[in-house]
Amino acid sequence: MSKIRAAVLGASGYIGGEVVRLLLGHPEVDVTALGARESAGKALDEIQPNLRGRTDLRFKPIEEIRDGADVFFLSLPHGEAHRVVPALPRDAKVIDLSGDFRLSDRATWEAHYKMPHAAWELQREFVYGVPEINRARLRESRRVAVGGCFATCAILSCWPLVKEKRSAGPIVIDGKTGSSGSGAKPGEKTHHPFRAGAFFAYEPFHHRHTPEIRQALGGADVLFQPHSAPMVRGVFTTSYVPLAAEPDGDAILELYRSAYAGEKFVRVGKGTSNVAHVRGSNFIDVGVAARGRMAIIFGAIDNLIKGGAGQAVQCMNIMYGLPEDAGLNQWPSII
Ligand SMILES: NC(=O)c1ccc[n+]([C@@H]2O[C@H](COP(=O)([O-])OP(=O)(O)OC[C@H]3O[C@@H](n4cnc5c(N)ncnc54)[C@H](OP(=O)(O)O)[C@@H]3O)[C@@H](O)[C@H]2O)c1
């Protein structure tokens, strides 16, 4: 079988760079084009020096990449992807890492993303890309909206309790993210002196991942509050889930072990998770604590891998019927 030809649009960013790094190590993929905006014309290793010596590819303007690929990975800012998708070949697969096609309700999307959607008629073609809750639909899909980083961590933390109707709601989810979650371009609230020793909350009640979490959890009553933590990589969520009934012994832990039995990228444990234990890998560590009628679930992911590039490659593997961990066998580096 010939290899899958992949183009990465937004390859000069943090997520795009990780998509390229993973695809260059994927046994079934040839990376055929790298799309960028300001970095167009530069060699890959001028922007991603970690990939020096790996390929001679150079960045091209995004709008010049319309063919020569079987699958297009879009790692563009939200508000860009929905303008690009209509111009891509109809028969190509599209894996979008932005938030542009994740929500199925237009008014909710436009309220949270604060702009009119430019290609809403295409939204229904997109399948939500969190494989552990949506694998069957991903197998049949041509277009995927990969789950957001906070959303992926929170959804996989709460899903077993919600699916088994063990949650009495409302669920309170407290999230922390590292600075790479804000992308490669520094801003007032994202540059190093501001963030390095700081810890603060932002966007109470209004974060874009709130409706995404609610939608994936079947409309569950969810309150999500994000925080900026002084680390570079990593998302950590603490989910407080009131239980419908008091469980026996380790019943909640067993529920999680059983829900994720056979999942290659979900590691269930007792007590807290730790972002340092998943860094650089596609794992989510889900930690379980329960007492009385309350469960506290601790989720940890690498925002750029399970929260983005790794999950996108996992979705591609499913779409092509490949082993789900092809190209994704990196174990975490603890430092
Ligand atoms: N960072 C995360 O943890 C994370 C996790 C999951 C999903 N995502 C999503 O993935 C997408 C990319 O995020 P990122 O963190 O990789 O961002 P980033 O580092 O800022 O990268 C943005 C990329 O898009 C290109 N681009 C094209 N048009 C652009 C425009 N009008 N303004 C700015 N950049 C433009 C940039 O090219 P030039 O640099 O060459 O101009 C760059 O390649 C976003 O939709 C984000 O929400 C991010």
Image (tube, helix red, strand yellow):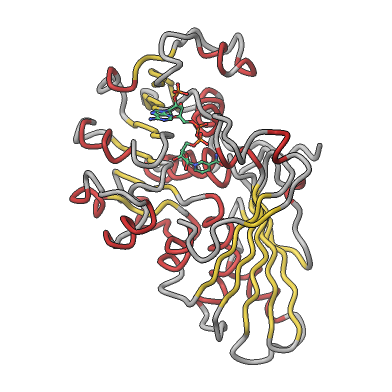
- Which quarter of the rendered picture does the N terminus lie within? top left
Closest to the observer: 261 or 164?
A: 164
Residue 324 seen: no
Residue 333 seen: yes
Residue 127's spot in the image, x, y percent? 34, 53
Q: Choose top left, top right, bottom left or bottom right for residue 52.
A: top right
Residue positioned 43% across, 21% down in the render = 30
Q: Choose top left, top right, bottom left or bottom right for residue 310.
A: top right
Closest to the observer: 108 or 320?
A: 108
Residue that lies at the very extreme toward the bottom in this rendered image: 245
Residue positioned 54% across, 71% down in the render = 223
Against 317, residue 174 (above or below) is below
For this view, does 170 lie left or right of residue 274?
Answer: left
- Which quarter of the rendered picture does the C terminus lie within? top right
Residue positioned 56% across, 82% down in the render = 167
Residue 158's spot in the image, x, y percent? 57, 69
